[in-house]
Image (spheres, helix red, strand yellow):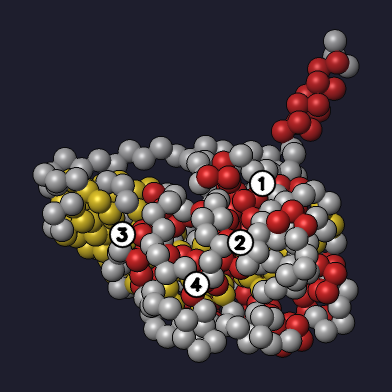
Amino acid sequence: MRKIFPFLSLCILSALAVAQVPKSNHVVVLVEENHSYSSVVGNSAMPYFNSLASQNVLFTQYYANTHPSIGNYLMMTTGQIITNSDGYTGTITADNIVRHLLSAGKTWKSYAESLPSVGYVGGDSGVYVRHHNPLTYFSDVKNSSVERLNLVPFTQFATDLNNNQLPDFSFIAPNMNDDAHNGTLGQADNWLKTHIAPLLSNPEFQKDGILIILFDEGASTDTAHGGGHVATVMVGPNVKKAYKSGKLYQGQSVLRTMMEALGMGSFPAAAASAAPMSDAFTSTLPSPPPTPTTCSATTTGVTVCSPAAGSSAASPVRFTAAAKSTARITAMRIYIDNVSVYHTTSASLDTSLAVATGSHHVVVQAWDSTGAVFKNARTITVP
């Protein structure tokens, strides 16, 4: 029996240590345009993209869902095609990734190159096209003066990256000249090298980041699996190196993978039954369950249980707080030095955030359904 038990233990550990989608604080997806797999992979005009593909994970059997573009963008963010009209101007009320991000208290931004202004939800403008920026259609964004502020020009990306303020989820849409739609593949590749190389070398991204770069659809004559065979790569510290995945994936699996990486357990539409792209990751043991929230509000307003006012706390700093009102609490936010760093639509929060060394002014703010605002401010020091 002494020889059997070690063997059984090894089998149990081997069963547990299967490739899973690891948790990430920085999931980034970037979408290129209108080229089939055969015109991209191995093409000398795209040396940077192909170096990422050869050194990280290349999905050799990834297929777009439909033609033209918009249905693929929506599948990656709602789990549904919804429309095949690139000129669509309606509001999408269907379940979507932003709704789940807000419910989970996660931060997000859409970085769209040549977007006319912050919060812009209008139509095409110059080399900016709206149907490449799917989050602009969602009622959760269009109908919220707060969430629209997460629609920003791509110039904001470098600023956020340099200040270690990238959100949990980033959607990147180059403009029509730089996404290979109007411009050449070489131009798209140079753009990627200029803007993505700094992301991959960023210390925060190197901790647990996940980057997915894919083409939205193949050439118009390529209708395999609906939208054609397209090039897709994944990069990150927990992503396998020099690996080719031969599993069949489509947009709903991208959505499922991104949401699992962000710690979510429910998924919109087709993503609920889609396979995550878990073979791309190194084997990991299951993450331990999170510490339950113990903070509660006994009086009207915001109660902050941690960190204590005037306290010293090592980064990452754990924030626990709760809000109470005679009306339903609809949202809570954490501001550090007047910058919003966390958001949830629940009446309590429990999260750990990376905070730079030094003294910081922290405000935990809540809103109820009547529009009433409650705040709790304090100063903390991170040694």
Check residue 87 in the rendering and tell me which mark sits there, or answer none: 4
The disc, 4 or 3, on the residue closer to the chain's N-terminal end is 4
Density class for disc 2 (Cα within 10 Å; few <14, some 14-19, many ≥20) is many
Q: Which residue is mark 2?
A: 72
Position of the C terminus, as image quadrant, is bottom left
The disc, 1 or 3, on the residue closer to the chain's N-terminal end is 1
As displayed, is residue 2 above or below residue 47? above
Relative placement, left or right, of 166 versus 332 is: right
Please give the count of numbered marks on the rendered protein.
Answer: 4
The disc, 1 or 4, on the residue closer to the chain's N-terminal end is 4
| Kind of residue sitting beneath label 1 | Pro
* Quarter of the figure with residue 91: bottom left
Q: Which residue is mark 3?
A: 333
Q: Where residue 209 sits in the image (x, y, percent)?
A: 62, 62
Distance from label 4 to label 2 (Cα)?
14 Å
Relative placement, left or right, of 147 versus 154 is: left
Q: Which dot, 4 or 2, sits closer to the camera?
A: 4
- CB-based contact (under 8 Å), mark 4 and mark 2: no
Q: Where residue 119 sits in the image (x, y, percent)?
A: 37, 75
As displayed, is residue 252 above or below residue 310? above
Distance from label 4 to label 3 (Cα)?
35 Å
| Kind of residue sitting beneath label 4 | Gly
Density class for disc 1 (Cα within 10 Å; few <14, some 14-19, many ≥20) is many
| Kind of residue sitting beneath label 2 | Asn
Q: Is residue 380 visible?
A: no
Q: Residue at x 69, y 87 (%)?
A: 183
Q: Residue at x 40, y 65 (%)?
A: 90
- CB-based contact (under 8 Å), mark 3 and mark 2: no
Distance from label 3 to label 2 (Cα)?
32 Å
Give the SS element for disc 2. helix
| Kind of residue sitting beneath label 3 | Arg
Density class for disc 4 (Cα within 10 Å; few <14, some 14-19, many ≥20) is few
